[in-house]
């Protein structure tokens, strides 16, 4: 009897396959399993309540045509809906539901097929015509965002490694969903689009879609206005890899969160890859439903931090190589020292410098960099910068500037070096690692030790403390 049931359903599938798009068939009919066929009533098993509701809403006319053709005009359909998938010890828990879009009901409670007219079969939504086709072709990805152009450093290594693993096996790894978070301009969008471009290049049958949460919300609002919600949802349920940027902007938008929740559930259930970005980890997101936040934590959450000095220098070098521009190493170092906030600001500073050089027909050198950036960065020669601190301290302690940056261990040089490090930490925005780099490439622990040594000497040596106070007055006058 089971073999007969399978044969009937396979015959139905042959008819259904010729009536709908390949992607829709793969999404909505391949997961269905035939359960039984008795007295012209076919029972099929579907994975969820949502799946059942969607079939009833969109494909009832297709099912009606197929089953009436195979079993006759009196045929009826019944769904076996999986409520709980069960475990190796317990079989799945299911409930049986009739076809509900019916014009009448039979005495045994199993519904007949609804009118195809009620499905508005001839209706074509503006959303489909305007957005779906173009979205499918383009995926909204920027081709310039690739793994090759993404500089890896300690600040982003975990996120990049996870993204690359997802790109090779989307939907297969345990990194689903993949949530990347971090501040503005740290490369989140670049990385997630690099994942999408890698997938499109190597797995061309995958439907990859990148969309910002703002655009997703606007599309949904348009769909609501034009009564096209089902078409909107149907489109997103066909996606193989959904990349949604800045999910924090879904906060407070209850209806949008509702539709995204259903889309998320369906995609995840069928092994589709979901990638998201936000400005903070899921636990700190406000205004989002708890059920959404819990799902965001199912996979991997990785952060992107501010790039360190070496990463910033590598980013600048990669950028100028790509643009075919030569910039001396000392200018590259100066830019990396001066801008330690985020990659976007660093790239903006670099563009500004190149523009000034082009407009003034001047070579790019350290002096031009300082002049160009004096209104952009905060820690430069017009204020108290590391170069200025080193010069003033060297003069005060009567040591050569070159010796203070070198590896000399004479007592007077060591003290001058430690004092310069102390004031560099006090008056600049540089990280400890960046300060150490200015002093002959020393590490951050050396800077910490220097600051502590200066504080200890001030507590025990009044003459030394007076010297520090005198230097402070000079630096404060410079700031003013």
Image (tube, grey):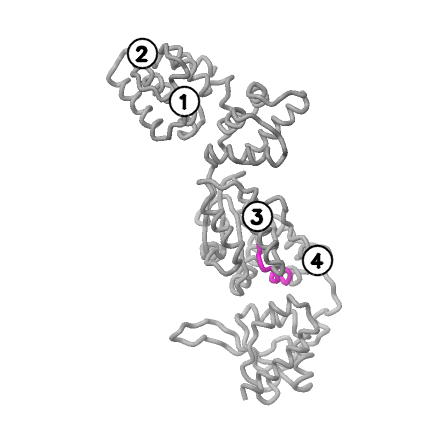
Res 389 → quadrant: top left
Q: Can you tell which of label 1 and label 2 is closer to the viewer? A: 1
Position of 322 relative to 373 (above/below):
below
Please name whichever residue, 257 or 142, is drawn nearer the observer in this view of the structure. 142
- Per the image, label 4 sits on a secondary structure element best described as helix
Residue placed under numbered mark 4 in the picture: 133
Q: Does the residue at mark 4 contact the one at mark 3 (Cβ under 8 Å)? A: no
Does residue 235 show up magenta in the picture?
A: yes
Label 3, residues with CA under 10 Å away: few <14, some 14-19, many ≥20: many
Give the magenta part as a residue range: 233-242
Tell me the tag on residue 466. Answer: 2
Secondary element under disc 1, as helix, strand or loop, is helix
Residue bearing mark 3: 194
Query: How many numbered tags mark residues here?
Result: 4
Q: CA distance from mark 4 to mark 1?
A: 57 Å
Q: In the image, what residue occupies the spot 38% across and 75% down?
A: 89
Question: Quick one: label 1 or label 3, which is nearer the N terminus?
Answer: 3
């Amino acid at each position: 009897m089971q073999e007969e049931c399978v044969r009937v359903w396979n015959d139905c599938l042959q008819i259904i396959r010729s009536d709908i798009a390949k992607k829709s068939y793969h999404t909505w009919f391949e997961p269905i399993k035939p359960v039984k066929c008795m007295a012209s009533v076919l029972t099929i098993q579907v994975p969820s309540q949502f799946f059942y509701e969607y079939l009833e809403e969109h494909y009832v006319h297709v099912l009606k045509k197929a089953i009436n053709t195979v079993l006759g005009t009196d045929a009826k359909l019944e769904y076996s809906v999986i409520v709980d998938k069960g475990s190796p010890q317990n079989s799945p828990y299911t409930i049986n539901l009739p076809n509900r879009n019916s014009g009448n009901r039979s005495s045994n409670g199993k519904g007949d097929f609804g009118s195809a007219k009620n499905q508005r079969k001839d209706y074509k939504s503006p959303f489909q015509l305007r957005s779906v086709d173009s979205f499918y072709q383009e995926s909204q990805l920027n081709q310039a965002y690739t793994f090759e152009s993404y500089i890896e450093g300690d600040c982003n290594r975990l996120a990049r490694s996870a993204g690359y693993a997802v790109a090779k096996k989307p939907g297969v790894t345990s990194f689903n969903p993949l949530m990347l978070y971090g501040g503005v301009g740290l490369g989140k969008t670049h990385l997630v689009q690099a994942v999408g471009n890698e997938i499109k290049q190597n797995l061309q049958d995958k439907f990859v879609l990148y969309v910002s949460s703002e655009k997703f919300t606007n599309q949904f609002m348009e769909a609501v206005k034009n009564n096209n919600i089902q078409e909107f949802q149907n489109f997103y349920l066909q996606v193989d890899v959904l990349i949604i940027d800045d999910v924090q902007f879904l906060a407070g938008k209850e209806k949008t969160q509702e539709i995204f929740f259903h889309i998320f559930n369906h995609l995840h259930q069928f092994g589709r890859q979901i990638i998201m970005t936000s400005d903070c980890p899921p636990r700190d997101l406000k205004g989002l439903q708890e059920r959404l936040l819990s799902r965001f934590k199912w996979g991997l959450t990785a952060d992107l931090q501010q790039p360190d000095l070496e990463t910033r220098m590598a980013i600048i070098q990669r950028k100028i190589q790509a643009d075919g521009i030569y910039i001396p190493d000392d200018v590259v170092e100066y830019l990396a020292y001066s801008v330690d906030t985020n990659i976007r600001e660093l790239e903006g500073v670099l563009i500004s410098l190149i523009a000034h050089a082009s407009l003034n027909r001047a070579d790019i050198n350290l002096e031009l960099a300082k002049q160009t950036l004096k209104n952009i960065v905060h820690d430069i020669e017009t204020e108290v910068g590391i170069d200025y601190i080193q010069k003033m301290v060297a003069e005060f302690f009567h040591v050569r500037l070159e010796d203070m940056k070198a590896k000399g261990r004479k007592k007077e040089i060591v003290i001058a070096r430690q004092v310069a490090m102390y004031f560099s930490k006090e008056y600049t925005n540089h990280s400890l690692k960046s300060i150490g780099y200015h002093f002959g490439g020393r590490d951050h622990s050396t800077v910490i030790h220097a600051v502590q040594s200066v504080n200890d000497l001030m507590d025990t040596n009044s003459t030394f403390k007076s010297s520090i106070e005198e230097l402070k007055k000079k630096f404060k006058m410079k700031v003013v």
